[in-house]
Amino acid sequence: MKIPRILKNRMVVIGAAVLLVIVIMAAWPKSQPAELAAVQRGPMRVTVDEEGETRVRARFVISAPVAGRVLRIDLEPGDAVARGRTLLATFLPGAPNLLDARARAEAEAGVKAAEAALGRAQAERSSARAALDLARSTLERNRRLAQERIVSRETLESQEAAARAADEGLRAAEFAVAGAEHELSMARARLLTSSNPVAAGGKSIRIVSPIDGVVLKRLRESEAVVPAGEPLLELGDPRRLEIVSDLLSNDAVMVRPGAAAFIERWGGEETLRARVRRVEPSGFMKISALGVEEQRVNVIMDFEDPAEAHDALGDGYRVEVRIIVWESEDVLKAPTSALFRRGEDWSAFVHEKGRARLRSVEVGRRNGLEAQILSGVEAGEKVVIHPSDSLEDGARVTPQSS
């Protein structure tokens, strides 16, 4: 039985159409899976993250006033000491050599220099006390103005930080006076022993603590003959801690005194607050773990939380710091994983009607997760994050998440 010609022609046409459809479907570009994220407005913060170390702000090294024998020191690190009451060490001066006129003049000059240093420390203490009184009165005035909504909350917080800094300045000045008094007593002891060698060889010198604090280090334990100036103990107040972090110099230039900081991974559950007190003006070279020479700058920070919040920390403890160098409460931002370089410009793929459209964007501030968008995309649009190298402009994409 023969198939009619017209039916045969229809079968050929249908077969050709099916073949054409198969070829077109094979050649048709496949949709690529893409993970999307929305461009949105919100707060953004840029920080400099680095490791840091705690240290006692005011530390004192107790040394031998003259050459002689120091008896065994029973104090151990962590023992509390009281100013003017705790016996640190007993020292038996050796019979000194007779001093000529020049050496005696130097010893007398040492006493005068120590007296001048004590006077300067006392003047600085008076200045610090006046600065604290002024800071407290200004703080009280700003608190009253804040209640009347005349000054901003930021101004009040800044003045509170200034008052705390003034209080710490007074405490540091008091420690400086105590240290100067100790240096003066040592200078007088040198002059005394050089003037009376018989008494010097037979009378012991009792060294008492110049501060209230604890023993940080015991540098000499057993009885021994030591030269003048030999370090014996290191004292300090562990409640008065600061944080020092050595930043890369190109990060340190972005940090300003007064910048807020957060202390993390220090062993406690809470994140501690701190504030930058000083960015040291001189840098130094440091060899990284990979053997790379780096220029570093020390940044000093003070705790803002009460001492009870970080009482578990001591001198020389490791912490991680995050220093805020820029922040804003309302910026247009996108994930940094959606941005990539095309020549000198930044670009991103924007999801439009099932396709990825390539756009040039202008980027402002960036942190590890987000970037400030100045132009190129709008709030609410979705961008492709982690775009593959095979993704091209106009390619069909299948959203994986939103």
Image (spheres, grey):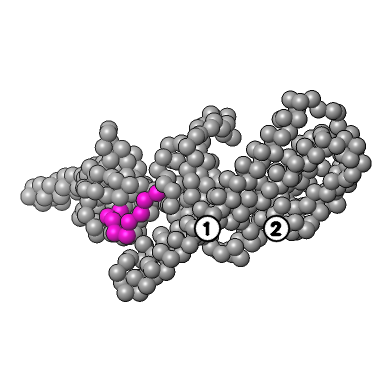
**Regarding mark 2 in the picture, which secondary structure is present there?**
loop
**Regarding mark 1 in the picture, which secondary structure is present there?**
helix
Q: Earlier in the sequence, mark 2 or mark 1?
A: 1
Residue, disc 1: 129
Boundaries of the magenta span:
325-333
Q: Please say if the residues under marks 2 and 1 sit with CB atoms less than 8 Å apart.
A: no
Indicate the quadrant containing the C terminus: top left, top right, bottom left or bottom right. bottom left
Residue 212 - label: 2
x then y, percent, for residue 64: 79, 40
* Residue at image location 52% in from the left, 47% down from the top: 300
Would residue 332 be counted in the magenta stretch? yes
The type of residue carrying mark 2 is: Asp
* Residue at image location 79% in from the left, 35% down from the top: 228
x then y, percent, for residue 137: 43, 66
Q: Residues within 10 Å of mark 1 (few under 14, many from 20)?
A: some
Depth check: give the residue in front, 354 or 151. Answer: 151
Q: Tell me if I can see residue 222 in this picture.
A: no
Q: Tell me if I can see residue 155 in this picture.
A: yes
